[in-house]
């Protein structure tokens, strides 16, 4: 018991105050099966974690980020501190932005430390496996299971829901720019292309049958604008397909890149205040450039803005009930503190 308590205290020391917003817990409730943007009225207010920010805005521009250069043991302790729900064989994390789920051999990733995390959580030989996770640059829900049968059942549920075009995941994003429509669908054919040594997602106009056979995928996302202010928007996004960087590229196609997108935002050009798309194949990734007015609202210097984390958070997941006719279970993860700080600066709220 003393050893377990000592490890937990170590995890808290590693993360310090920045993790307190992540430890407030994951709300679990039931939601209608046909709910498209199912954040109920009791959740439609400014997230509690936004109230964590109490000091001057310039002191710590991005509270809640995972500390750099963590050791393997420190990462396990940090992930243990990020556990927000345990139900039977399921373990749910509120993953910090910047932590990759998978990677090359020898890299420190979520997958690489699952054996140690399983032991730390007292699961013995029942090793955790990833069922659903947000990507490296996004934050939010990661669903793990120590039971292969449960993991298989959930993965089949997600696949069936995708085929039926029933969204199971809802992301929150802050965009640099306001979409023309308040809600709608974004459809685009996408492919991965190796450009200057990096795999990038590129849109494909009018894909042929040959393109589809060669890896081009037709993608679809729902979006809804929740709030606007200072030339930015708080948007809920629901992917109905799965493709690398799908949501980031979809918002670029709306001329409203996600705040902190240092990979695809350069594809949006501006002339005399009018935005337009630049050719994806010839536009290299670069640090997102924000105008002076937005920098002032965010209380950031240009050098700080160059380190702005991606404001894309997997906020909500629907899971199947115990029986086929049961109402799906809804999991909700609070926003990270830096995300809530941005909402405060821009005057944006979940209404």
Image (cartoon, helix red, strand yellow):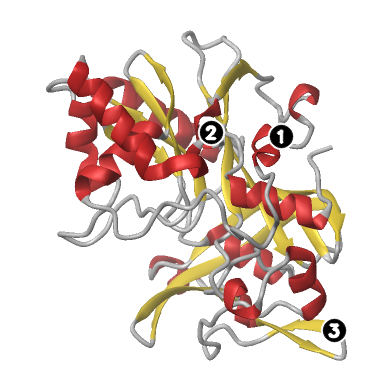
Q: Is residue 234 left or right of residue 245?
A: right
Q: Earlier in the sequence, mark 1 or mark 2?
A: 1
Q: Residue at label 1?
A: 36
Q: For mark 2, give the secondary structure.
A: helix
What is the distance, in whole Å, between disc 2 and disc 3 at their CAs? 38 Å
In contact (CB < 8 Å): disc 3 and disc 1: no
Q: Is residue 27 left or right of residue 32?
A: left
Residue 166 is marked as none
Split into 4 quadrants, where in the image is the C terminus? top right
Q: Residues within 10 Å of mark 2 (few under 14, many from 20)?
A: some
Residue highlighted by disc 3: 274
- Separation of disc 3 and disc 1 at Cα? 32 Å
Q: Nearer the viewer, mark 1 or mark 2?
A: 1
In this view, 110 is above or below 108: above
Instruction: Look at mark 2 in the image and give the residue it sits on.
Output: 161
Q: Earlier in the sequence, mark 2 or mark 3?
A: 2
Local crowd size for mark 1, using a 10 Å CA cut-off: few (<14), some (14–19), many (≥20): some
Q: Is residue 314 visible?
A: yes
Residue 27's spot in the image, x, y percent?
59, 22
């Amino acid at each position: 018991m003393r050893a377990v308590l000592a490890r937990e205290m170590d995890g808290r020391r590693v993360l310090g105050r920045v993790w307190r917003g992540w430890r407030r817990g994951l709300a679990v409730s039931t939601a209608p099966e046909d709910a498209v943007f199912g954040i109920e009225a009791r959740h439609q207010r400014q997230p509690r974690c936004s109230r964590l920010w109490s000091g001057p805005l310039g002191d710590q521009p991005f509270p809640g980020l995972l500390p750099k250069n963590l050791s393997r043991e420190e990462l396990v302790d940090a992930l243990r501190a990020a556990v927000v729900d345990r139900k039977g064989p399921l373990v749910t994390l509120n993953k910090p932005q910047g932590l990759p789920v998978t990677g090359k051999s020898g890299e420190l990733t979520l997958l690489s430390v699952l054996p140690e995390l399983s032991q730390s959580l007292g699961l013995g030989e029942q090793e955790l496996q990833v069922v659903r996770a947000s990507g490296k640059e996004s934050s939010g829900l990661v669903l793990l299971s120590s039971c292969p049968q449960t993991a298989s059942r959930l993965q089949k549920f997600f696949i069936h829901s995708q085929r039926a075009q029933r969204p199971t995941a809802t992301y929150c994003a802050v965009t640099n720019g306001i979409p023309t429509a308040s809600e709608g669908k974004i459809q685009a054919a996408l492919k991965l292309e190796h450009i200057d040594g990096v795999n990038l997602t590129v849109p494909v106009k009018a894909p042929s049958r040959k393109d589809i056979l060669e890896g081009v995928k037709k993608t679809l996302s729902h979006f809804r604008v929740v709030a606007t202010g200072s030339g930015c928007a708080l948007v809920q996004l629901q992917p109905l397909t799965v493709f690398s960087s799908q949501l980031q590229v979809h918002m670029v196609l709306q001329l409203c890149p996600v705040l902190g997108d240092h990979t695809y935002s350069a594809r949006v050009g501006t002339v005399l205040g009018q935005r337009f798309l630049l050719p994806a194949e010839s536009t290299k990734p670069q640090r997102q450039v924000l105008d002076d007015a937005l920098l002032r609202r965010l209380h950031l210097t240009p050098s700080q803005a160059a380190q702005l984390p991606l404001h894309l958070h997997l906020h909500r997941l629907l899971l199947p009930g115990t029986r086929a006719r049961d109402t799906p279970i809804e999991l909700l993860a609070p926003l990270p503190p830096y995300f809530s700080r941005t909402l405060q600066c821009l005057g944006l709220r979940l209404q």
